[in-house]
Image (spheres, coloured by chain):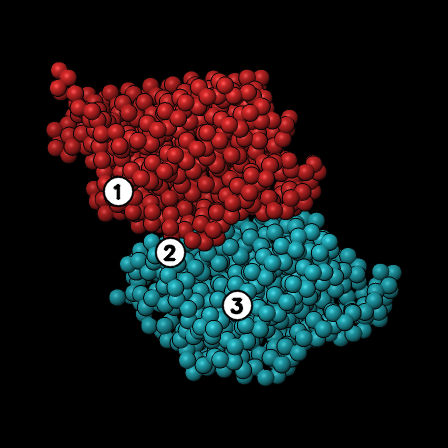
Chain colours: A cyan, B red
């Protein structure tokens, strides 16, 4: 049983999703919701032993499953987690519960399909995080586009068709180069798709650079990094609340995770050579996109741009090649999962009541929704990186790492803390404080128990991780050292 | 004189003989069947196909056996392709049945008999080891198809399509024959294995040979429907009755693949450098024109026609990467990938045209893209099936179309044609757009037509199975992949 934990984490949500789909029409909507919630909770429960049974001293892969899948091409069903991926499996399973709960009363049409899409996507994304076979990774990576395409397109806003196509084609464009890179590695390694084999594979500098660039296109689109980020604001704005939560909390992490699993260990020399490029793009994301966020009139767009800026921090942390930077980036990724998920949920709460995401349509919300305003405040502060929240820990670690790396990089990165505070808190001020702006705001009702529970749990996570990040850094420590060990060895022979 | 006459070994051709006999028998029996009792003909036709499959299983030796003075060959590749052929034709007939019952001009015994003769033609093509056998097979297939396309006599579009198909098909046959005659002139034999032997011995006039090869490739390109010999495909797919489009868009691809293998690989492998160069151009052009033109279509059958052009172009990538600068090390990998691609394509194509037939009813063709609007609301199950078929065609995992593309692409990369692989993936990206649009119509748009689907339960079950097979074989592609590889290993 314990040997199949990861398989369970992948397939329980997928089969639960198929089960939900079988409930059919909206007449059975309550049943579909219950089944989806049960599936999500079961999916989360099976991931807990991954954490409790995890050996923190071991930097290698744990809970490994290895079965042949397509022997014709030596493709294996090879799964395993290390300290880096384990956290994301848990985060993903946890966010799935939040998403199902977030759509509980809001989604009224095609309820079964809605919940099924999220459950199936959750399972597929667990597959991405745990695949140790290049093709298996790719297959999950690309298959996960289908549910999100449908989620944006079916339950999205007025411009949803454009956003769904842009999302799908953009990501497909990136991943096709990734597929070519995988095939090259397959042939170069003499017929292996094992990622762990590739970590040891000597590659000359020229091919390394091409591989690195192919990986970069795929993952940069997914992260997304400036200048290939433009699909994200569209996707976020049009997606339903649940879609935005999953997109920000998990889907963006896939690209960053790809850097750690592929780019850094497989092409370390090229990573060092081209780190300037990635650092430059990251800093542009952090500073420039921060300013772009400042001028947004749409709350979802603002948080979307802030996500890009935060993910810029993550890639910045990776490409300084220090334990502090990488761990800081990982903490930032988890924290961003909680905080951005909560931010999008907060916007969703207001949108469900007023049906507008424009900042200008709000003002004085605190007068009618005091509980909500308090919780929203916490998440806004976390988004701005206030100490004692999880948002602070990651950014602080990355900036610390950056100071050692290069003062000016650190300076630019640190300046973003100010920009981040500016755009988040200014939005908060305009929406929440002041006099009641119009009759819509005057008629607002405060959050109900379901919404309070969702925000409360996320608040606990944000605060807990901010006050005591030790458990998170502890599990990733050995694996990050192992990774940096790979990155430090030249693959050129 | 009679002493020299040797009765050929009939066993390797037993399925062909059986089918020919059955087709003639059904033609006679059908005369006694009233229009209202046409089910008898249908059942007999299915039994004929089933019988062929059974005979194929029983007579298959796994060895390469030549008969009829080396004009006919039976090997594992032909066995496997024929088995898929019987299955495809059987499924096609199931899908078509409701459609032709709704259209009295088509509900004739000839429909079934012509289908069987076309099938026989394809079987002969698959097992041909002689230029004349190939020609015989092609003509048997084509003449049956011309008549089937024109079968709906009242439709102007069908008649026009049949006319176009006939004229261009005759031209293509002419090109093919001309090429064959050139090669005969150069090598002095019409036997495919004989041509290979003469070429190996080296005493051949290459000038004439290359000249013949150009015509041969052009003729094959016509039959495959690749650019720039594709003009008939959109018009015929569009104009033919949908049940005939389904037939001609699926099974003949298997036979076309077989004759490409027989002529170019079995016969002219020493000329690989020449024909690979030609096929690369055809392949890239097909992917470009097919994918770009498909975007502009509003008719689903026409869109699928362009999609077929691009898929055949993609399949050719597997054929062109078999021999790299005289080294045939990658041949098995490349050709078996192409074979897997064809089989996967036939499965997807049958399902997709089957969906159009499922949506059609008396007096309504359901072949416009807009007819699929809001299908998710009318029938979530079949919208889901169509979704799987579309994503499979686009090459998204976990569907068989992805592994088909993967198999071919890895052969291309292994052969060192990186630029070709990049071109292929770029055109696939463009292609993804129009498949996604079908999904968009079904899921994102509201239905304009609320009438329930009228298709019978057998068709519903079969199309569901077809769609699920696309997903199932996408998760477990190994069986068919290794079957293709094994069959070619034993046949080349």
State which quadrant residue B378 falls in.
Answer: top right
Query: Does label 1 lie on the same chain as label 2?
Result: no
| Closer-to-camera residue (A226/B105) | B105
Q: Is residue B212 above or below residue A68?
A: above
Q: Earlier in the sequence, mark 2 or mark 3?
A: 3
Distance between the alpha carbons at the discs numbered 2 and 3? 22 Å
Q: Residue at x 46, y 56 (%)?
A: A139
Q: Which residue is mark 1?
A: B62
Q: Are marks 3 and 1 on the same chain?
A: no
The residue that disc 2 covers is A70
Q: Secondary structure at mark 3?
A: helix
At 32% from the left and 27% from the top, the residue drawn is B17
Q: CA distance from mark 3 to mark 1?
A: 44 Å
Percent coordinates x, y for residue B71 in the rendering: 24, 27
Residue A78 in sight: yes
The reply, left or right, for residue B140 in relation to residue B305 is left
Q: Which mark is residue A9?
A: 3
């Amino acid at each position: 049983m314990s040997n199949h934990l990861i398989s369970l984490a992948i397939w329980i949500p997928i089969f639960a999703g198929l089960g939900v789909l079988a409930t059919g029409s909206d007449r059975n909507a309550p049943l579909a919701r219950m089944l989806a919630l049960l599936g999500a909770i079961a999916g989360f429960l099976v991931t807990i032993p991954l954490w409790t049974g995890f050996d923190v001293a071991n930097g290698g892969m744990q809970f490994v499953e290895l079965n042949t899948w397509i022997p014709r091409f030596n493709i294996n069903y090879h799964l395993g987690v290390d300290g880096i991926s384990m956290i994301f499996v848990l985060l993903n399973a946890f966010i799935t519960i939040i998403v199902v709960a977030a759509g509980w009363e809001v989604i009224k049409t095609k309820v079964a399909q809605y919940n099924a899409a999220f459950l199936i996507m959750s399972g597929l994304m667990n597959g991405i995080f745990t695949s140790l076979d290049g093709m298996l990774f790719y297959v999950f990576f690309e298959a996960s586009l289908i549910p999100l395409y449908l989620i944006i397109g079916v339950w999205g806003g007025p411009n949803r068709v454009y956003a769904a196509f842009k999302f799908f084609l953009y990501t497909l464009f990136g991943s096709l180069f990734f597929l070519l890179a995988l095939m090259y590695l397959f042939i170069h390694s003499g017929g292996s798709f094992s990622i762990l084999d590739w970590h040891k594979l000597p590659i000359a500098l020229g091919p390394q650079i091409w591989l690195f660039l192919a990986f970069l296109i795929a993952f940069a689109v997914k992260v997304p990094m400036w200048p290939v980020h433009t699909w994200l604001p569209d996707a976020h704005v049009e997606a339903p609340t649940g879609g935005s939560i999953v997109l920000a909390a998990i889907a963006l992490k896939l690209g960053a995770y790809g850097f750690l699993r592929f780019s850094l260990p497989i092409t370390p020399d090229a990573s060092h050579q081209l780190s300037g490029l990635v650092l430059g793009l990251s800093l542009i994301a952090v500073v420039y996109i921060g300013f772009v966020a400042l001028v947004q009139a749409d709350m979802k767009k603002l948080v979307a741009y802030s996500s890009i800026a935060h993910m810029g921090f993550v890639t910045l942390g990776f490409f300084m090649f220090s334990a502090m930077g990488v761990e800081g980036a990982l903490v930032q990724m988890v924290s961003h999962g909680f905080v951005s998920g909560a931010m999008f949920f907060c916007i969703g709460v207001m949108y469900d009541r007023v049906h507008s995401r424009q900042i200008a349509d709000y003002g004085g919300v605190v007068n009618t929704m005091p509980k909500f305003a308090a919780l929203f405040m916490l998440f806004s502060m976390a988004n701005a990186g206030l100490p004692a929240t999880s948002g602070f820990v990651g950014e602080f670690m990355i900036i610390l790492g950056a100071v050692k790396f290069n003062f000016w990089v650190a300076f630019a990165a640190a300046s973003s803390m100010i920009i981040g505070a500016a755009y988040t808190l200014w939005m908060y001020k305009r929406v929440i404080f002041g006099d009641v702006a119009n009759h819509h705001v005057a008629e607002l009702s405060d959050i109900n128990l379901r919404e309070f529970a969702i925000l409360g749990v996320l608040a606990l996570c944000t605060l807990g991780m901010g006050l005591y990040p030790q458990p998170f850094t502890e599990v990733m420590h050995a694996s990050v050292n192992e990774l940096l060990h790979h990155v430090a060895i030249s693959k050129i022979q | 004189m009679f002493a020299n006459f040797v009765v050929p070994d009939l066993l390797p051709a037993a399925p062909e003989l059986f089918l020919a006999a059955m087709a003639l028998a059904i033609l006679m029996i059908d005369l006694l069947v009233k229009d209202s009792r046409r089910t008898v003909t249908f059942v007999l036709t299915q039994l004929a196909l089933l019988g062929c499959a059974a005979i194929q299983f029983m007579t298959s030796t796994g060895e390469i056996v030549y008969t009829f003075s080396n004009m006919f060959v039976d090997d594992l590749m032909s066995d496997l392709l024929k088995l898929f052929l019987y299955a495809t034709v059987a499924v096609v007939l199931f899908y078509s049945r409701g459609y032709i019952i709704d259209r009295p001009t088509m509900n004739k015994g000839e429909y079934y008999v012509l289908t069987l003769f076309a099938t026989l033609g394809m079987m002969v093509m698959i097992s041909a080891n002689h230029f004349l056998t190939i020609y015989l097979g092609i003509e048997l297939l084509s003449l049956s198809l011309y008549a089937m396309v024109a079968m709906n006599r009242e439709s102007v579009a069908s008649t026009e399509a049949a006319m176009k198909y006939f004229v261009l098909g005759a031209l293509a046959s002419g090109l093919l024959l001309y090429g064959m005659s050139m090669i005969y002139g150069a090598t002095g034999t019409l036997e495919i294995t004989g041509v290979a032997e003469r070429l190996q011995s080296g005493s051949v006039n290459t000038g004439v040979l290359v000249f013949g090869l150009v015509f041969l490739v052009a003729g094959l390109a016509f039959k495959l429907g690749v650019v720039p010999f594709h003009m008939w495909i959109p018009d015929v797919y569009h104009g033919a009755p949908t049940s005939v489009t389904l037939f001609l868009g699926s099974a003949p691809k298997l036979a076309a693949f077989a004759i490409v293998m027989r002529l170019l690989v079995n016969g002219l492998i020493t000329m690989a450098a020449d024909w690979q160069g030609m096929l690369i151009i055809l392949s890239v052009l097909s992917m470009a024109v097919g994918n770009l033109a498909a975007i502009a279509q509003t008719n689903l059958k026409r869109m699928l026609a362009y999609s077929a052009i691009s898929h055949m172009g993609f399949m050719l990538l597997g054929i062109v990467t078999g021999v790299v600068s005289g080294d045939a090390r990658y041949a098995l990998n490349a050709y078996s990938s192409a074979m897997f691609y064809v089989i996967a394509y036939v499965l997807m194509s049958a399902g997709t045209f089957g969906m159009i037939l499922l949506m059609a009813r008396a007096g309504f063709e359901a072949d416009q893209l807009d007819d699929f609007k809001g299908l998710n609301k009318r029938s979530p199950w079949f919208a889901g099936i169509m979704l799987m078929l579309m994503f499979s065609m686009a090459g998204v995992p976990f569907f068989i179309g992805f592994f088909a593309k993967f198999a071919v692409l890895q052969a291309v990369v292994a052969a060192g044609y990186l630029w070709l692989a990049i071109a292929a993936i770029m055109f696939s990206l463009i292609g993804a757009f129009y498949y996604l649009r079908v999904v968009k119509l079904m899921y994102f748009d509201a239905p304009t037509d609320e009438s329930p689907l009228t298709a019978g339960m057998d068709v519903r079950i079969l199309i569901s199975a077809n769609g699920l097979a696309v997903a199932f074989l996408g998760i477990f592609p190994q069986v068919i992949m290794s079957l293709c590889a094994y069959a070619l290993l034993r046949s080349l």
